[in-house]
Image (tube, grey):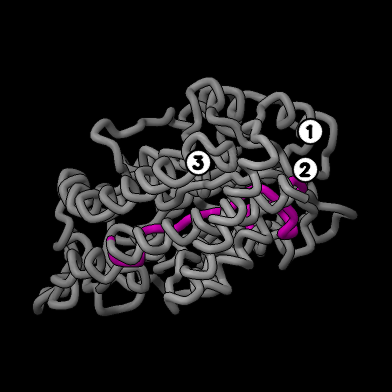
């Protein structure tokens, strides 16, 4: 990342960066790039949901959605998302509005009851650990901290987690019970898992018989490029490899329709589905089937989901293009940064010189540009290189995105040149 500069050239660049930063602070900006939230315009695309089900209260099989029951969710909605999530409809559950809630509950049930294939509850074992591809999703890490699960970082590559490291760790340590995966357009790098990675995850020997892959397919339909990325079917690969119970698949409509009123999905082997349903029956008499019917009537089928996501893409793509365009114009050739150009998902990963990420984030905040805390992309909030910054351009307006990235580039130049001059 280093570009050689003469002392005089460096002095000049640093002085200009300081002047630009003072001008930036003087603008009095108030911009937020912290979370990957849908913008109001994206939510407006699903406004018709609020007028549904328009007096209808019967599902396709005649079920009265106003009443109790239906722990598996509406069959027609499960059928609609079976293709999207690569799970047979019979093995897919449509539940509440949050896939994060489902991940939480699966951890709770694994702690307090025996997972299929296990001999004891996780809570009765001396130590539980999860592999955490990094950079990764901070809320996965928060769940581990909540339950006292040790986190073992594994480097993330353009094809998924470093599988040599994964295979070695799961084979030698029976305390390793799981791995977090965002397989398509990963948070925050935008990388997608290769077919080879999926095959190795499905077939690898594990010391723990109850090892689980938490397959958080949050961006299954969230394409930015003209040619959508497709990933291999992990659930089918696990079954073929003789490990049918290995994977828990999660997904939701949170960034498809309305983030606060979507539908979450769980998919797995028949045995795992029976396991979760048995425990869910003790905490709920059924999901919000009225909301599920709304989604059926609004999206109609898998083609309807794809058409709706094309409208989402039309709103998101210009923002991501602006991020790349401005970073290239402001930082290209400086040797101060590299960044991802994702083909889907909700994030861009910016990498700055080692030891600079926290200071860049701090300077940006002082200038009114709030970013996700540096380190949040790594277990325990600790990026050992202090180099990764997650950019979430979805929520601000296009003009605000441009202002924020221009300001962020100023902060990168200031901190980067200060470090070189030190």
Residue at 24% in and 49% down: 313
Read off the magenta span: 376-398
Magenta stretch contains residue 15: no
Residue 139 percent coordinates (x, y): 59, 61
Per the image, the residue denoted by label 2 is 176
Q: Foreground mark, 3 or 2?
A: 3
Residue 179, can we see it? Answer: no
Residue 356 percent coordinates (x, y): 69, 52
Residue 143 percent coordinates (x, y): 66, 62
In depth, the one of 151 and 272 nearer the eye is 151
| Vertical relation: 269 (above or below) 277 | above
Per the image, the residue denoted by label 1 is 169
Helix, strand or loop under label 2: strand
Is the magenta region chiefly helix, strand or loop? loop
Per the image, the residue denoted by label 3 is 339
The N terminus lies in quadrant: top right
């Amino acid at each position: 990342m280093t570009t050689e500069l003469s002392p005089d050239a460096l002095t000049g660049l640093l002085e200009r960066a300081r002047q630009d930063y003072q001008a930036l602070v003087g603008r009095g900006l108030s911009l937020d790039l912290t979370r990957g939230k849908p913008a109001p315009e994206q939510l407006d695309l699903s406004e018709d949901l609020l007028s549904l089900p328009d007096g209808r209260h019967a599902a396709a099989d005649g079920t009265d959605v106003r009443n109790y029951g239906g722990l598996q969710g509406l069959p027609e909605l499960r059928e609609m998302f079976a293709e999207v999530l690569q799970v047979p409809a019979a093995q897919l559950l449509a539940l509440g509005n949050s896939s994060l809630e489902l991940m939480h509950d699966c951890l709770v049930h694994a702690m307090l009851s025996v997972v299929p294939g296990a001999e004891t509850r996780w809570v009765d074992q001396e130590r539980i650990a999860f592999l955490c591809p990094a950079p990764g999703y901070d809320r996965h890490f928060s769940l581990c901290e909540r339950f006292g699960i040790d986190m073992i970082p594994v480097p993330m590559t353009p094809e998924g987690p470093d599988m040599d490291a994964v295979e070695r760790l799961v084979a030698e340590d029976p305390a390793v019970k799981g791995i977090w995966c965002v397989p398509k357009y990963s948070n925050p790098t935008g990388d997608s898992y290769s077919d080879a990675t999926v095959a190795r995850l499905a077939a690898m020997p594990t010391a723990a018989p109850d090892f689980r892959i938490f397959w958080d397919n949050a961006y299954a339909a969230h394409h930015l490029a003209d040619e959508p990325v497709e990933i291999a079917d992990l659930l089918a690969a696990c079954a073929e490899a003789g490990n049918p119970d290995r994977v828990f698949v999660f997904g939701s409509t949170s960034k498809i329709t309305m983030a606060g009123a979507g539908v979450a999905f769980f998919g797995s082997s028949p045995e795992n589905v029976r396991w979760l349903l048995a425990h869910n029956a003790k905490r709920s008499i059924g999901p919000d089937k009225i909301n599920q019917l709304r989604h059926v009537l609004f999206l109609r089928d898998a083609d309807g989901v794809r058409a709706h996501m094309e409208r989402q893409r039309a709103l998101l793509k210009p923002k991501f293009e602006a991020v790349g365009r401005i970073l290239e114009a402001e930082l290209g050739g400086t040797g101060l940064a590299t960044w991802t150009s994702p083909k889907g998902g909700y994030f861009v990963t910016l990498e700055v010189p080692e030891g600079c990420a926290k200071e860049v984030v701090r300077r940006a905040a002082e200038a009114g540009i709030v970013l996700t805390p540096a380190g949040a992309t790594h277990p325990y909030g600790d990026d050992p290189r202090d180099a990764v910054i997650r950019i979430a351009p979805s929520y601000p307006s296009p003009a605000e995105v441009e202002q924020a990235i221009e300001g962020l580039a100023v902060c990168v130049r200031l901190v980067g040149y200060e470090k070189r001059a030190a």
